[in-house]
Amino acid sequence: MQEDMQETEVRETNTQNGNTVVQKRRIARSELAPGVVVLQRIVWFIAGLISVIIAMRFVFLLLGANREAGFTDFIYSASSPFVAPFTGIFGEPVYGTSVFEVSSLLAITVYLLIAWGVAKLFTLARPQDEV
């Protein structure tokens, strides 16, 4: 990921104290994130949030979590639209109440790859540093 832009300001003052010249140096540093970095961070945040919700769904299904519990129902409802395009691609083995949902793992992989591609798109117009 691209580094944050740093700006350093150095202020020097010279004062005379008797026969001695005293030199004082103050350094002020400010760090600014350019717009491209902010956009990349937003993309990665959204992709991370989606991936965490899908990963929780995967773990809940794997452990056979109670679908009637409020939090479990929320996770299933929130992740369902993101997993739906990948449902049915592979078989999903069921062991009693546990489900190994391959479509959740595929969805996480695809969304992270999409996020990587979108984050890279923001840097296309940036001039490359010469070595």
Image (cartoon, rainbow, N blue to C red):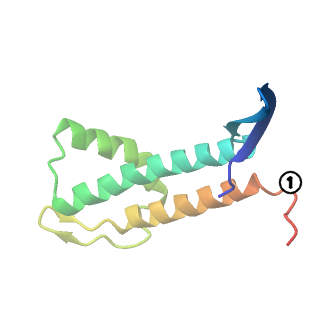
- Kind of residue at disc 1: Ala
- Residue 107 percent across, percent down from the top left: 46, 61
Residue beneath the point at 16% across and 41% down: 68
Give SS at disc 1: loop
- Residue 72 percent across, percent down from the top left: 23, 44
Question: With 58 as the anchor, is 69 left or right in this view?
Answer: left
Residue beneath the point at 35% across and 57% down: 55
Q: Is residue 4 above or below residue 103?
A: above
| On-image quarter of the C terminus | bottom right
Question: With 86 as the anchor, is 30 left or right in this view?
Answer: right
Q: Which residue is mark 1?
A: 125
Question: With 73 as the anchor, is 69 left or right in this view?
Answer: left
Query: In this view of the protein, which residue sits in the foreground, 20 or 117?
Result: 20
- Residue 47 percent across, percent down from the top left: 52, 51
Residue beneath the point at 31% across and 53% down: 57
Residue beneath the point at 75% across and 41% down: 8
